[in-house]
Image (spheres, grey):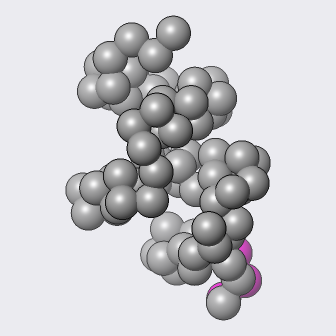
Amino acid sequence: MKIRPPKRLFWFIKEGTEIDLSDKRQLDMYVQQIMSRGITSDVKGLFDIMSKNELLGSFARIKIFLPSEVRKFWEEALGDTH
């Protein structure tokens, strides 16, 4: 699945560039940016494009890269991800 990410969150990507969410590296970058900089509607949008298990898998891969406050918030919100 390819999407054009919102520019306000992905200012570092060239305008018009699509992200291929079937590529785990691109999916993880997308989830990381949404989890750390997104608003409620952005987070809700994650569930429109991926299952809870996919989100948990992505979170497990990216959580070490999140700021500690953000990581702790998502660990509490998502529950035990081990």
Q: Would residue 13 be counted in the magenta stretch?
A: yes
Quadrant for residue 20, please give it: bottom right
Judge whether 23 appears above or below 32 on screen.
Answer: below
Residue drawn where x is 42% and y is 44% of the image: 51
Please indicate whether residue 60 sits to the left or right of residue 45 in the image. right
Residue drawn where x is 53% and y is 49% of the image: 31
Q: Nearer the viewer, residue 65 or 28?
A: 28
Judge whether 57 appears above or below 37 on screen.
Answer: above
x and y percent of residue 61 in the render? Answer: 65, 29
Q: Residue furthest left?
A: 40
- Total marks in image: 0
x and y percent of residue 32 in the render? Answer: 55, 46
Q: Is residue 70 visible?
A: no
Q: Would residue 43 be counted in the magenta stretch?
A: no
Q: Is residue 40 visible?
A: yes
Judge whether 51 appears above or below 5 on screen.
Answer: above
x and y percent of residue 63 in the render? Answer: 56, 28
x and y percent of residue 29 in the render? Answer: 65, 51
Please indicate whether residue 30 sits to the left or right of residue 39 in the image. right
Q: Nearer the viewer, residue 13 or 46?
A: 46
Please indicate whether residue 57 sits to the left or right of residue 6 in the image. right
Q: Nearer the viewer, residue 52 or 42?
A: 52
Residue drawn where x is 32% and y is 17% of the image: 79
> Which residues lie in the magenta part?
11-15
Look at the image and tell me in which quarter the N terminus lies.
bottom right
Q: Nearer the viewer, residue 79 or 49?
A: 49
Residue drawn where x is 64% and y is 46% of the image: 28
**Magenta span: chief secondary structure:** loop
